[in-house]
Amino acid sequence: MSAPSLLDDLKKTIEACGIVGAGGGGFPSHLKLDSRANTILLNCAECEPLVQVDQQLLSNYAKEIISALIKLAEALDANIVIAIKKTYNAAISAAESAVATLDRSHPPIRIAILDDIYPTGDEVVLIYEALGIVVPPGSLPIDVGCIVYNVETVYNMYHAFEHATPATHKWVTIAGEVERPVTTLLPVGMPIVEVIKYAGKITIDNPAIVLGGPMMGRLVLDKNETIQKTTNAILVLPNDHQAQAQASDTMSLNRVASACCQCRTCTDMCPRNGLGHPIEPHRIMRALSARDAGSAALLGMMYCSMCGLCETVACPQSLAPRSLIKTFRTALAKEGVRAQKCEANPVPYGREGRLVSAGRLKMRLGLSKYDVEAPMVLKGI
């Protein structure tokens, strides 16, 4: 079968099985396959604290995942790069062992070991850390010849390619104030309140439920909410926990106007700014607090990755640049404003000194006590 025909067949299979980005974006996976690609990059950075799905899947199903990657790479005549955080020892070992058993006929495969920093899982940051390439502002990974898939997405592709199995279930880490933290496979559409029971009893009264990781997740306010194809974690936290406040997404412009001292720490620690993208959160805060709707700085909101470092680690006044950016960017998007393609500025000198380790982030968020193993269990407990 010729490569173009194989590519078309893979696209049709992926689409027919309903596979979307399982890491949170939910973008239809078949639409990413593009003949311009020279690299398939497997994202096993999984930098959100407490979430364990991707590293566990790669640890347990490396052969299956790599076999799906090879199909994709052969159809595109592309290389494979498997990017794994250096702290994920089991995943690294499993990937290395799986690659070692392959014959020499497969496309080139490289395992890139990443530093344990947040937010390495962001595609723009990941491509720079694994490949040394800066994705230009407003551009997509394919514009630099790269396609990024997270581990679970490719795991779903394996089952689609081999068994025509549709993506009807989702691996989810359940952690926090529960008896038995666990990572388990759950049907899409299952109520969140039922899901938590797979981790035993909730160990506190009146808990807050965060859907997703503690940095980019959101509070569950609707008791009827269900598991989606993008749900990777459910965290049970105290109502007054810092990570719960992060997920609440509230901030007063009046407080910003009175307290923001324009120290620019939020900008210095912004991962996208650190790769030359035209986003300066401190200038955005100044424009918003001054109600300056015409400020050019506001267009920088469109390049934000929503990682949340500006408000959890950077700001000495405990302000919330990300929350404000999220609110006002949504309004701009409704008016048709989009991130414009442009050239990136040079990567700033001393970028490495601005990076935030995952360990430091967990301590800052008060999550260290919850950073325990959540064993992968196929059918819950």
Image (spheres, grey):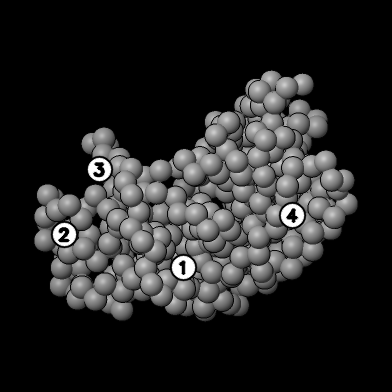
Residue under the point 46% across and 47% down: 222
Residue under the point 29% across and 52% down: 301
Question: Alpha-carbon distance for marks 2 and 1?
Answer: 27 Å
Type of amino acid under label 2 = Ala
- Observer-nearest residue: 49 or 138? 138
**Left or right position of 56 against 261:** right
Question: Mark 4 or 2 closer to N-term?
Answer: 4
Type of amino acid under label 1 = Ala
Asked if disc 2 and disc 1 are in contact, CB closer than 8 Å, the reply is no
* Coordinates of residue 140 in the picture (x, y in percent): 45, 42
Give the labeled residue for mark 2.
287
Question: Alpha-carbon distance for marks 1 and 3?
Answer: 27 Å
Residue 252, by quadrant, is bottom left
Residue 219, by quadrant, is bottom left
Q: Nearer the viewer, mark 1 or mark 4?
A: 4
Q: Is residue 319 visible?
A: yes
Give the labeled residue for mark 1.
243
Give the labeled residue for mark 3.
332
Circle 4: element type: helix
Give the labeled residue for mark 4.
58
* Coordinates of residue 281 in the picture (x, y in percent): 28, 63
Question: Mark 2 or 1 closer to N-term?
Answer: 1
- Observer-nearest residue: 319 or 106? 106
Quarter occupied by the C terminus:
bottom right
